[in-house]
Amino acid sequence: MFESLHPNLLALFAAILLAVANILYRDSLRELSPAVASFVTHLVMGFIACGVYAASGGVEKWPLIGILWFLLAGLVGHQDVDDSGKLSIEWPWMELVLTPEDGEATPKPLPTEMPFEVEANTALGMRGFVKSKSLELGSLIELTPDELAEICFFVHTSANQVHNSAVEYTRRAGIQVVDKKETRESQQCTESSPSPPKSDS
């Protein structure tokens, strides 16, 4: 069935579906728990895979065992665990540190409700540490909304650092880089600035 379609057309369809899926994932995770979102995602992918499987010649081209393994995505397998038989997920995070004038430092995990009260003459600081979560073999990989938000924040921050480093390296190499953000801000300033008065000749 797919052999008759041009590869560029298939790539276009895949890009559109991926973009739509990313938008739906982002919006749904605001309302649903990660477990429900994962279940719905696998359910939809299962229906699509079975439909393609049925329309592509059956077992000869799409082994049923391959589809079943595809639906098991999200479970901790033997290749995921270490010598202790567990999967360890680690990510960097931050916490506030409250240090009274005559006491020991007390960590306060983020996120925290704002505003919050502290004793007088208390030093407020911040430090980084590594958070971790262990999962047993065969268990479902589940993250709380806070844990997922922390991991996404770390990935977003790291991606920005890589982007800024690449732009800085490119500019040092003498290559002109057009910053879309700076261009938009310049256009907004130009549009908002008053036009010069016209003189009567």
Image (cartoon, grey):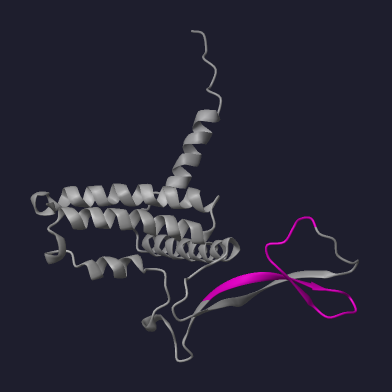
The spot of residue 136 in percent (x, y) is 49, 81
Picture quarter containing residue 118?
bottom right
Is 126 located above or below residue 9 in the figure?
Answer: below
Q: Which image quadrant for residue 159?
A: bottom left
Q: Name the outermost residue toward the left.
A: 4
Q: 57 above or below 84?
A: above
Q: Is residue 104 left or right of residue 42?
A: right
Relative placement, left or right, of 126 versus 83 is: right
Residue 193, image quadrant? top right
Place of residue 25 in the rendered image (x, y in percent of width and height, measured from the top left):
44, 52
Asked if residue 92 lies in the magenta stretch, the reply is: yes
Determine whether, in the image, residue 103 is placed left or right of residue 190.
right
Residue 26 seen: yes
Left or right: 94 in relation to 154: right
- In the image, the segment drawn in magenta is 90-115
The residue that appears at 43% across and 84% down in the rendered structure is: 81
Q: Residue furthest top?
A: 201
Residue 22 location in percent, x, y?
A: 40, 52
Count of picture labels: 0
Percent position of residue 4, x then y: 8, 50
* Residue under the image location 38 percent in, 83 percent down: 78
Whether 131 is drawn above or below 172: the answer is below
The answer to whether residue 110 is magenta is: yes
Q: What residue is drawn where x is 29% and y is 68%?
A: 68
